[in-house]
Image: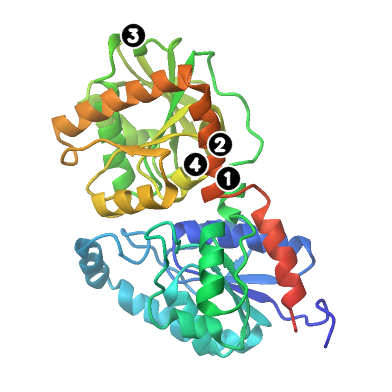
Amino acid sequence: MKPPGSDPRPILLLSNGHGEDLSGALIGQALQQRGLAVEALPLVGHGRAYSQAGIRVRGRTREYSTGGLGYTSVWGRITEVVQGQILYLLSRLLLLLRIARRYRLILVVGDVIPVIAAWLSGRPTATYLVAYSSHYEGKLRLPWPCAPCLRGRRTRAIYSRDALTGADLTGQLQRPVHFLGNPFFDGALSPSEPLQGTPVQRLGLLPGSRLPEALHNLELMLRVLERLPEALRPAERLGLHAALVGKLTPQEVAPLASRLGWKLQLEGDERCCLQRGPLLLQLEWGRFAAVVQQCDLLLSMTGTAAEQCVGLGKPVLQLVGEGPQFTENFAEAQRRLLGPGVFCAGGDPGSDAQLDATADQLEQLLERLLHDTRWRSELQQLGMERIGSGGGAARMAADLHTHLDG
């Protein structure tokens, strides 16, 4: 057997979604730190997380409004067909088959589709099943033919997203499935500068990363804030911070804010806020880690970001929208995945009943956080159980290194 570092060929990261790309990029950086060459082939989207990490992305990429493969709704699946996403996926798979032999190992980050693709390539593989968890139903039912592919001799290692799933799949597949932590959680642990102000409590808004959905989500969140009781409105009582992606610019936000009675105010060259009476919402770009680390409660319409918050021991209040990503089905599945630290008010998306109930629940959760220290400890324990500790990317890279050329 050759030593692990003797093969100069790179490792290929194969992923199929925004959150999967983030995890893949973090694992890729950890592999590079061990002196290994890494490239990436995202099956959906541009794979910006890879580019930002300095990892080469193979082929010409495109992005679609669903942000992934549309499991959240029938409309999402229809949208994919209309936009040509299925044909695009087939072209990405063909690219994989053409270039597969250039790689010493393919690391799958995702679900059954990249698992099948990696199996068809004929190359040695490792798989991080970030999309599946036994917490959904108590026993994981892998879609066919995921299990036969994972049992194959070319599969060198399998990693799960939580300990329960690791134990479940170890029994089902009759081979070790390891839980080493979740690399996507590492992104929430980076050092951050203090947020402005010194309020009693802070509320973070997470409207998502994909336009135009994120803009629609922000509108719903602003309408919830308008329903807060008078006691919570002053900035010294409750600091409000919205973690926004770069594409959600002040120019995008200003017309929406004006229509709802909010004023956009610039604070120097890099900071701005929205104000409506005593309500003051700080808009934060490039400060996701600061928002999730320093806010006491998160109002969320996100996937991976909500998981990171749970890992930090923070309660998450969902606000169901019209999608295409953050739909009622998606939110319900997320609550099963992440457990009792995730809350959601009832009512049709965007209705007065939903927004009123969300504002009421927000007030109740903030009150509980002030007085229930035992609950805060339980949230920390829940985070360890469902997400794990930081350093998952480094542990996974170290374990992968032992399987190279084996």
Counting from the top left corner in percent of width and height, residue 113 is at 42, 76
Residue 179 % position (x, y) = 61, 61
Q: Does residue 292 appear to the left or right of 303 in the view shown?
A: right
> Measured along the vertical axis of the image, is residue 335 above or below residue 94?
above
> Mark 3 or mark 2: which comes first in sequence?
3
Report the coloring of the rendering: rainbow
Residue located beneath label 1 in the image: 384
* Alpha carbons under labels 3 and 2: distance apart: 28 Å
Which mark is nearer the camera, 4 or 1? 1
| Count of picture labels | 4
C-alpha gap between disc 1 and disc 3: 34 Å
Nearest to the observer: residue 75 or residue 253: 75
The mark lying in front, picked from 3 and 2, is 2
The image shows residue 355 at horizontal and vertical percentages of 21, 30
Amino acid type shown at disc 1:
Met
Of tags 1 and 3, which is closer to the observer? Answer: 1
State which tag comes first along the sequence, 2 or 4.
4
- Mark 2 highlights which residue? 380
Closer to us: 326 or 287? 326
Residue wearing tag 4:
310
Could you tell me which residue is drawn at 55 percent across and 84 percent down?
151
